[in-house]
Amino acid sequence: MRGRRLCYCILLLLVLTSAVEAIAAAGTGSGNGSEKWGYVQVRPRAHLFWWLYRSPNRVEDPSNPWPIVLWLQGGPGASGVGIGNFQEIGPLDTNLRPRNSTWLQKADLLFVDNPVGTGYSFVEGKDPEVFVKTDEEAGEDLARLLMALFNRDEGLQQSPLYIVAESYGGKFAVTTALSVIYAVQAGKLKLILGGVALGDSWISPEDFVFSWAPLLKDVSRMDNTGLEKSNGVAMRISEQLKDGKFQEATSSWNELENLISSFSNSVDFYNFLLDAGMDPLSLVAVELAATGGLSMRKYSKYLSSTRTSTPGGDGGDLDELMNGTVKKKLKIIPRNFTWGEQSDMVFAKMGGDFMKPRINEVDELLERGVNVTIYSGQLDLICSTKGTESWVEKLKWGGKGTFLRKERTPLYCGGEEEGTKGFTRSYKNLHFYWILGAGHFVPVDQPCVALDMVGAITRSPTNSKLKVR
């Protein structure tokens, strides 16, 4: 099966490559070369927007090449160029002030608004047939974008690329990594894949929906009645997935989220210690009695909301920023196009793929020797640590047994006197980080740990403060 899939993907890439290589990654950048941005037409009428930052901390070491992090946001339909960049790990916050914890300290950063229709990326005429419908299609589009960027830039080719994802972006990360591998093997992409990091990622929806009610019951946020009702819907979702009724499973997921919210008095799905809307980056305060469509967007609602204040006084309005100052700076965004205006269509088009697991893709990456890192915020509910541990136990990778038996190692950031910041466990090419005190948005909740963790993941030549005892 895998061989047939590989042959199919290689043939597909052979057909597409000539067209992709003819497409210039048209764009512009700063005068000093510290950043570049542009569009790549990955298919007819489909345009992906990218933004690359060069690190001022770059260290030239032939024995340890400077890394590039490709950041993939979730949703599906959330803007990495907006959220990941200005709210989580980029050089500036939404008030355009320098971010002390920017990941540029450890790597160059490549943000892409993915899939097409997300953020600044767009589909001409909003043609419904051009939007992607599956994770594989999104991965293929990203591989085409990477061909356009890397194949003509020898500098980029020298730096290993690490695909780091958050939330639904984890599903895109594993399908993109496999598309990259196939393209490199076919000689159509000049790129070094350094690894994949899955942060609070929606890899196995079934495992997550079964984790929600028991977790909330354990932390006194739900009673036995809520537990019983929620588990009943989770069982229905499990049966729907077994029967291949993926669109129906997405509808049941929507129902379960409403049920969880009702019996927990509106718990925040991105930090179970809070009520919905209290976490500055969760942005999920919606009416519980809303229609299915609005509730479905609850998971990706933060992509378009104007409530974007973040800890530390970052109270800038992301929507105004992206459609005002940033759009003027970039100069190449279509005049009448509004950042994020097609994002709801992205989510709707992927409704049939939303609940599909991607455990097999993680297995394939591990079997191919790709470094896979999983990190999970302790307080996340939507992609809970409990659910993540469940899908990891389903891996068929040969090293799983040894990995699960190994003891965890405590993590410290800034000194042991400041307390335990998390735990880690590694075996061969699988690595897991448990991040304490963090919800869904680990780089925001625990910036010190997140920064040094990405330095370890990418083998950045810069020094690390993260202490492993």
Image: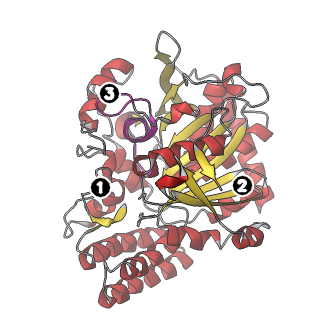
Question: Is 270 inside the magenta-drawn segment?
Answer: no
Question: Is residue 200 in view from this perspective?
Answer: yes
Contact check, label 3 and label 2, Cβ < 8 Å: no
Q: In terms of secondary structure, where does tag 2 sit?
A: helix
Whole-percent x, y for residue 235 in the image: 46, 84
Q: Main secondary structure of the magenta part?
A: loop
Whole-percent x, y for residue 351 in the image: 43, 60
Q: Which mark is residue 365?
A: 2
Q: Amino acid at mark 1?
A: Asp
Sequence-earlier tag: 2 or 1: 1
Question: Is 82 inside the magenta-drawn segment?
Answer: yes
Q: Nearer the viewer, residue 104 or 123?
A: 104
- Residue neighbourhood size for the residue with mark 3, other residues' Cα within 10 Å, grouped as few (<14), some (14–19), many (≥20): some
Question: Which residue is labeled 3 in the image?
Answer: 96
Q: CA distance from mark 3 to mark 2?
A: 38 Å
Q: CA distance from mark 1 to mark 3?
A: 21 Å
Q: Amino acid at mark 3?
A: Leu
- Residue neighbourhood size for the residue with mark 1, other residues' Cα within 10 Å, grouped as few (<14), some (14–19), many (≥20): many
The boundaries of the magenta stretch are 74-98
Q: Nearer the viewer, residue 391 or 184?
A: 391
Residue drawn 37% across and 60% down?
A: 270
Q: Is residue 139 left or right of residue 160?
A: left
Q: CA distance from mark 2 to mark 1?
A: 34 Å
Residue drawn 38% across and 28% down?
A: 98
- Residue neighbourhood size for the residue with mark 2, other residues' Cα within 10 Å, grouped as few (<14), some (14–19), many (≥20): many
Residue drawn 34% across and 87% down?
A: 229
Contact check, label 2 and label 1, Cβ < 8 Å: no
Classify residue 183 by image quadrant: top right
